[in-house]
Image: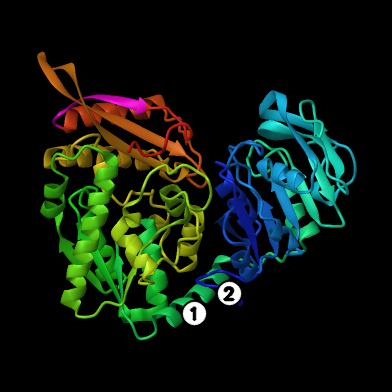
Amino acid sequence: MITGGIGKPVQKVIILDFGSQYTQLIARRVREHKVYAEIVPFHKPWKEIYAEKPSAIILSGGPSSIYEKDAPQLQKEILNLSVPVLGICYGLCALVKHFKGKIESAERREYGRAIIEIKRESPLFRGLKNKETVWMSHGDKVVHPPNGFSIVASSENAEIAAIENIEKNIYGVQFHPEVYHTVNGQRIIKNFLFEICKLIPSWTMKSFIESSVQAIQEEVGDGTVLLGLSGGVDSSVTAMLLQKAIGEKLYCVFVNNGVLRKNEHEKVIERFKRHMKLNLIYVDASKRFLSLLKGVKDPEQKRKIIGREFVNVFMAEAKRIGRFDYLAQGTLYPDVIESVSTRGPSDTIKSHHNRVPEILTLIKSGKVIEPLKELFKDEVRELGLELGMSEELVYRHPFPGPGLAIRIIGEVTPQRVKILQEADDILVEEIKFAGLYRSLWQVFAVYLPVRSVGVMGDKRTYENVIAIRAVTSVDAMTADWAYLPEELLRRISNRIINEVKGINRVVLDISSKPPSTIEWE
């Protein structure tokens, strides 16, 4: 397969991001049909988008009203690409405004489930019923379609819920086909990709490996690569992919930053150095990191300190090795999206340790290799299995780069780290014993610097709290809190309180994402 960069096939869908919270879901849904999709900001110069040679364009939703001052606008040159275009919600409004249709603020905003009635045959709705359940999220509505466009569907509150111009191959929908609440949303996306765009479902993990290996070899040449290996899924898959591409030119540096899971450093050394035969260098910098984190309470500061110190450790190891041409990271797509807002007018949710200024400087200089940065977590797992990794490792729950530092609310101290390590180990052990580990996206303990009164052995205690966080998710962009059986919760709580000194209360987090995030910090 011919590719454009690491793992990127030439046949691809470009998604212009206008700031929707669902933009990443559009990319995910397209990829589920084995078609590569890439998100770029709506303001990316049209000449650069031309150079990408997209096979189709999707315009995302967004939080703005199309007539607001400084509202994102569609570059007119985008529509001269002569490829199919699908506008979703705000994307629909951008199309209508461009072609001089009429849009007004809706008298009654429409959020949530709605029923649309399909008025006429359309390749976009092929195979669907006359009435379909969809998910709406809009305050503006189209009141008059542009010349040359036909009304395809309507809802009670949006008389024009979908339009099309067959001649120009342009389509627009007021609702969000990418969210699960739109019952046949995947069928609509499938129709766009294959009925309208005539694309070929050829983007697979096997083809990704082949193209990535070739791209890595061409980029690295005779150089060496230094990878920060944490032992988690992302960095482990990155290591296996790089080893396949460049072999012994890969140096894996495993840093004990003092905020790892219980006995993690011993397990990583055993798994990767002795079993997988990776060129692994172990650095115990735990005291160094904990010293820098002393007194720091702000989560953003914790992330930046840990990210910055990782760079310092890497540089020191590079000098010791004697040669270092590239730094490799297991960065994923959500990491990039959540860290920066340059892809569209979205808010920065949180920075990531691998997106601190020192790392960004290296990225700009072309010294950083991130072979997974266009993948979602479930795609990385699929890639790991394709590379021959064990299911136990591939399906390990995500663990944040800053480690337990962002699961300890407030200041990070050696005592708090030890308490959380013990509590988290008990929690995960019981979840696995109950056979629920694989069904959960993440389960972990959080240390709360909140003291409460308790009674142990007829004595008064005044100790801290552990919160249990368990969620289900598909891609971490959204998540629901997971139901855990009462008996299991009882057993977990009893064990933590009885076995972990310093804890006398366990609470359960039952909030979903959004509005909460999966991690507490």
From what the image shows, is residue 89 above or below residue 325? above
From what the image shows, is residue 393 above or below residue 162? below
Residue type at mark 2 is Thr
Res 32 seen here: no
Which span is picked out in magenta?
501-508
Most foreground residue, 207 or 38: 38
Q: Residue furthest bottom?
A: 222
* Point 66% across, 37% down: residue: 67
Res 481 seen here: yes
Percent x, y of residue 214: 49, 79
**Quadrant (top left, top right, bottom left, bottom right) of the N terminus:** bottom right
Q: Quadrant of residue 516?
A: top left
**In this figure, which colouring scheme has been used for the structure?**
rainbow
Q: Which residue is mark 1?
A: 214
Density class for disc 2 (Cα within 10 Å; few <14, some 14-19, many ≥20) is some
Percent x, y of residue 4: 56, 73
Percent x, y of residue 456: 14, 18
Most foreground residue, 409 or 47: 47
Q: Quadrant of residue 411?
A: top left
Q: Which residue is mark 2?
A: 3
Most foreground residue, 414 or 147: 147
Q: Residue furthest front?
A: 69
* Point 66% across, 51% down: residue: 74
Q: Is residue 452 left or right of residue 53?
A: left
Helix or strand or loop: what does disc 2 sit on? loop
* Point 38% across, 52% down: residue: 396
Q: Are marks 1 and 2 in contact (CB under 8 Å)?
A: yes
